[in-house]
């Protein structure tokens, strides 16, 4: 057997045509169309809906900030937290937001290393989402300590009695993990943004735009001697972000796994949390991008194929999560530990029973299973419905793990059910406002699709693309290494 | 130093190419003609262009390795210093000796990543001599399309092989359009 039979080259060609990739940019759009369509979002005056949406989200954000101020000035008693439920909505929100960030880094780093070119249409906005989600997340560890002005105790410097932090504590690891994650995400995002800022600089019509975009574009001029170092830096940033993103939610899960609370004290938490983070994050990417794609008419760049692939990732990670849930129950039963067994029984039939049935079972385990069907992955409404289910479900999951475990601990005499106060609720809604406000500002002022990257996904970007037949191939030998 | 009849210093002779493929072929010709001080400009990185230009691998990775190692060492100092020497925290009588080092791994990892990322971020700018907001290429009006859909090649006047005629001929032969002299000022 040496190679394909020489006969029937037409059949081979036909087969090749059938397995050929569906183009990532539809309708044979060229470079200047991409530049035009993506820059135009930033350059045209803000549409009316934007002002309406921004007014609502900014007001929500402002009220959220008021609640945070009220909580700081009055005390943690304004929240529903009590003994034994010392961690409740605050840490739930922290884990919820930090988890959402993970999809952005997965798209920008891991899919880059895996040479998944479809990431180029969605990576910029997903990375922006990461930053804004981490900003929302970072609020909660700061304010839940109660004495906000002592949050500097978290920094690795001795406090006013010369006492140092315990670097062997999972909470200290978390400080480093989250702050590193945010910093590296900013550096990665800005690095990717530089060539696109140069595009906006070259298109700018007003002096102030020319100055601002020009300043932040660093004088980028697309030289190949620059691309060479730039691409290496981008590759390395992707390479180091990959273990970083896996570590961040692992470290977050250590905050729980290193304690003795039933349902927290498990070894499967790191992979379980990372899968859940990516699961919830992709749902948020879809929640943001499906409307943006329709409003800004970006259907040729964010194609049904992109949505299909994101839906498949949701199916995959959702199934991981469902498996982890099952395994938790199995281990609780198999361990023979009566506290574990009770805690999981309590999860399903205890005071928070409907959180489990609705959030964990329906939203997280069952709804993504729709994505086994191509029709569902290609139907925008179904995809949006599942994404919203997952957004809600992942919040419920974190709440049930955190408050559910604490509310029914070892001593029945100390059991108490947690009820949120209006400050709890509005602080959370406030962070939703902060997140959406930042995202609305982002799509107004920065290109929401990485133009320089998405251009590499169209066939004309290939240096061997369609040379005119009469042009002479250069006599220089191909150097390959 | 080459000057135009109007007294401008010449930075380079440049041409525009219709496509990435044409630019790629032209770059191979210019490389083989033995030029050293030249560059191609494109809206996106063109795959294989480094080889077409005769450039090797970028050694930015070496700096990043150095940055990562310094982050690891910083973490070791920041953790062992306070937790084993300056202020060992006694938590339920648990040991604070060297064998507790696995508890230090997460922060060692995080600082390795943090320092490596900062190094990568600053190294790509320093190695590219950026930020540089003024550059002779920006004097050419057509060049503003480089961030949209323009593909350009410029051979600098500093190159020892640069003569106006030979470079113009080479750019014409390789299919360059809008061939022009780019001024330094």
Image (cartoon, coloured by chain):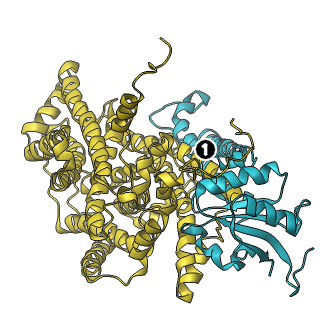
Q: Give x and y (percent) for residue A4.
A: 45, 20
Residue B118 visible here: no
Q: Give x and y (percent) for residue B131.
A: 69, 69
Q: Give x and y (percent) for residue A334.
A: 20, 19
Q: Residue at 59% across / 67% down in the picture? A: B150
Residue A125 visible here: yes
Tell me the quarter of the picture where residue B139 sits.
Answer: bottom right
In the rendered view of the protein, which quadrant contains the C terminus of chain A? top right
Instruction: Tell me if A83 is positioned left or right of B57 in this view.
Output: left
Q: Residue at 58% across / 51% down in the picture? A: A234
**Disc 1 sits on a residue from what chain?**
B
Instruction: Tell me if B176 is positioned left or right of A379 in this view.
Output: right
Compared to residue A445, the image places residue A147 above or below, namely above
Q: Label 1: few (<14), some or many (≥20) within 10 Å?
A: many
Compared to residue A279, the image places residue A419 above or below, namely below
Compared to residue A93, the image places residue A248 above or below, namely above
Chain seen in yellow: A
Q: Residue at 23% across / 24% down in the picture? A: A331
Tell me the quarter of the picture where residue A55 sits.
Answer: bottom left
Tell me the quarter of the picture where residue B152 sits.
Answer: bottom right
Per the image, the residue denoted by label 1 is B112
Nearer to us in this view, B140 or A216: B140
Q: Colour of chain B?
A: cyan
Instruction: Tell me if A197 is positioned left or right of B134 in this view.
Output: left
Compared to residue A99, the image places residue A31 above or below, namely below
Nearer to us in this view, B81 or A472: A472
Q: Give x and y (percent) for residue A298.
A: 33, 64
How many marks on residues?
Answer: 1
Instruction: Tell me if A214 is positioned left or right of B156 in this view.
Output: left
For label 1, the SS is helix
């Amino acid at each position: 057997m040496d190679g394909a039979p020489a006969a029937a080259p037409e059949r081979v060609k036909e087969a090749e045509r059938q397995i050929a990739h569906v183009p990532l940019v539809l309708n044979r759009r060229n470079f200047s169309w991409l530049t035009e369509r993506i820059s135009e979002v930033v350059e045209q005056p803000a549409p009316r809906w934007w002002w309406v949406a921004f007014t609502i989200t900014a007001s929500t954000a402002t009220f959220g900030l008021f609640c945070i101020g009220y909580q700081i000035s009055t005390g943690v008693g304004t929240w529903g937290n009590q003994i034994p439920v010392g961690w409740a909505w605050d840490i739930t929100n922290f884990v919820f937001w930090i988890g959402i960030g993970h999809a952005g880094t997965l798209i920008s780093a891991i899919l880059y290393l895996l040479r998944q070119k479809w990431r180029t249409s969605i990576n910029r906005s997903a990375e922006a989402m990461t930053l804004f989600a981490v900003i929302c997340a970072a609020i909660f560890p700061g304010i839940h300590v109660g004495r906000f002005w002592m949050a500097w105790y978290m920094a690795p410097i001795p406090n006013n009695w010369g006492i140092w932090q315990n670097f062997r504590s999972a909470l200290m690891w978390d400080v480093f993990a989250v702050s590193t994650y945010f910093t590296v995400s900013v550096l990665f995002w800005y690095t990717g943004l530089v060539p696109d800022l140069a595009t906006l600089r070259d298109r700018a019509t007003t002096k102030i735009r020319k100055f601002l975009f020009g300043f932040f574009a660093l004088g980028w001029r697309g030289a190949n001697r620059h691309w060479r170092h730039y691409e290496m830096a981008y590759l390395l940033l992707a390479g180091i972000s990959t273990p970083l993103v896996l570590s961040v939610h692992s470290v977050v899960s250590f905050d729980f796994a290193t304690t003795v609370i039933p349902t927290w004290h498990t070894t499967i938490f790191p992979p379980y949390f990372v899968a859940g983070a990516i699961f919830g994050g992709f749902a948020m990417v879809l929640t943001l991008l499906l409307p943006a794609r329709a409003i800004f008419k970006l259907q040729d760049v964010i194609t049904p194929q992109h949505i299909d692939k994101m839906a498949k990732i949701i199916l995959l990670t959702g199934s991981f999560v469902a498996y982890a849930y099952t395994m938790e129950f199995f281990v609780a039963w198999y361990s023979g530990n009566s506290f574990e067994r009770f805690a999981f029984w309590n999860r399903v039939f205890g005071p928070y029973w409907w959180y489990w049935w609705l959030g964990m079972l329906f939203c997280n385990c069952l709804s993504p299973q729709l994505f086994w069907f191509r029709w569902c992955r290609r139907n925008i409404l179904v995809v949006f419905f599942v994404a919203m289910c997952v957004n809600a479900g992942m919040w419920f999951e974190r709440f049930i793990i955190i408050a559910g475990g604490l509310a029914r601990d070892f001593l029945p005499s100390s059991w108490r059910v947690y009820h949120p106060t209006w400050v709890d609720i509005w602080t959370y809604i406030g962070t939703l406002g902060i997140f959406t406000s930042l995202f609305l500002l982002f799509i107004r002022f920065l290109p929401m699709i990485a133009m320089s990257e998405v251009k590499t996904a169209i066939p004309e970007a290939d240096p061997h693309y369609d040379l005119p037949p009469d042009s002479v191939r250069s006599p220089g030998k191909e150097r390959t290494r | 130093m080459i000057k135009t009849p109007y007294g401008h210093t010449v930075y380079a002779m440049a041409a525009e190419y219709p496509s990435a493929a044409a630019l790629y072929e032209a770059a191979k010709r210019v490389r083989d003609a033995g030029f050293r001080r030249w560059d191609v400009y494109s809206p996106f990185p063109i795959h294989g262009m480094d080889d077409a230009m005769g450039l090797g691998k970028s050694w930015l990775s070496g700096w990043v390795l150095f940055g990562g190692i310094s982050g690891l060492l910083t973490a070791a100092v920041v953790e062992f210093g306070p937790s084993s020497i300056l202020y060992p925290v006694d938590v339920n009588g648990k040991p604070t000796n060297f064998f507790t080092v696995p508890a230090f791994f997460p922060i060692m990892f995080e600082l390795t990543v943090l320092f490596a990322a900062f190094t990568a971020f600053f190294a790509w700018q320093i190695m590219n001599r950026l930020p540089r907001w003024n550059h002779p290429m920006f004097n050419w009006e057509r060049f503003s399309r480089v961030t949209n859909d323009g593909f350009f090649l410029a051979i600098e006047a500093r190159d020892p092989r640069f003569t106006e005629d030979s470079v113009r001929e080479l750019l014409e032969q390789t299919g360059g359009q809008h061939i022009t002299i780019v001024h330094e000022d």
